[in-house]
Amino acid sequence: MPGPDHEVYTHTHQPVVLASHGARTAEEAAAFLLNHLTPGMRVLDLGCGPGSITIGLARYVAPALVVGVDNSEPALAEARRRADEESVANIRFERADVYDLPFEDDSFDVVYAHQLLQHLADPVQALREANRVLVSGGYVAVRDADYGTMTYHPPQPGLDAWLADYHDLARSNGGEPDAGRRLMEWVRAAGFTDIHPTASTWLYATPEARAEWAELWAKRRLGDRPVSAETAEAFQNWAAAPDGWFAFINGEVLARSS
């Protein structure tokens, strides 16, 4: 069975990625879950990264403890720093294997995972482990992008090549970049019931949003290699267009533990 040292995170935890992920909020990334949270619910955030979403979830369920787990020590260090800086006390971050969580059965009321399953070699097994640590009737809430839905204007052959290359690289690393459309399939296979699928979009169309999205992809590394000069130029050309548009779907599933 894969473990935290054998999974490959295609994006890596380089500073530019941590900064981007650290700007995410519970209000945006977990909007499909928030109405179901109440104070006192115990929450586990799988693949918590730099912890900005986890911190948001902790505020909704305080005083109950929220636990964020990840396999990256740099990401966990940043998460702990943020929690201390924001004086969020009902939170803990630790390194863990999503296939073998260090928690007893029935430990949590909610297990949440944002942009995690697309990177796993066996997302169904990870969801089965989530089911194990949930109380009966507890919630699993998962959200993942679907790279196959990415659309952009004006046309950029360099972005076409980048997207094809990204699909190849992510799949060679054992992941599934079109995870958004498969979440319901995976959740059902893991034994969850009362499944509620939704979808939301990410859009980069204002000058500020285009500049941030282009800079993110122009500066990041994918695995052990930097993004090519051609890809960086294509993103910069797209961002400079006054009518530039880049959008894609995030699949979302909320379900109950069996």
Image: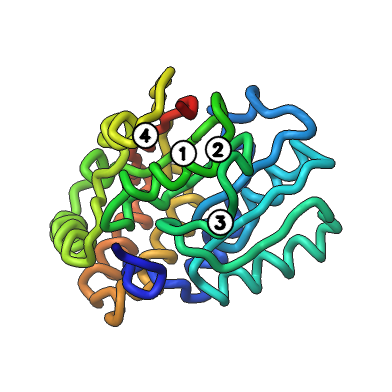
In the picture of the structure, the residue carrying the numbered disc 2 is: 134
Mark 4 secondary-structure assignment: strand
> Which badge, 3 or 4, comes first in the chain's sequence?
3
Q: Which of the labelled discs sits on residue 251, or is there none?
A: 4
> Which badge, 2 or 3, comes first in the chain's sequence?
3
x and y, in percent, of residue 103 in the image: 59, 54
Residue type beneath disc 2: Leu
State the residue at coordinates (18%, 59%).
171
x and y, in percent, of residue 133 in the image: 54, 43
In the picture of the structure, the residue carrying the numbered disc 1 is: 131
In the picture of the structure, the residue carrying the numbered disc 3 is: 48
Mark 1 secondary-structure assignment: helix
Residue type beneath disc 1: Asn
State the residue at coordinates (63%, 34%).
109
> Which badge, 4 or 2, comes first in the chain's sequence?
2
| Rendered position, 123 above or below 200 | below
State the residue at coordinates (65%, 70%).
78
**Label 1: how many Cα within 10 Å (few below 14, some 14–19, many 20+):** many
Q: Nearer the viewer, mark 2 or mark 3?
A: 2
Q: Is residue 212 left or right of residue 168?
A: right
> Which badge, 1 or 3, comes first in the chain's sequence?
3
State the residue at coordinates (55%, 38%).
134
| Rendered position, 36 above or below 148 | above
Label pair 1/2, CB-CB below 8 angstroms: yes
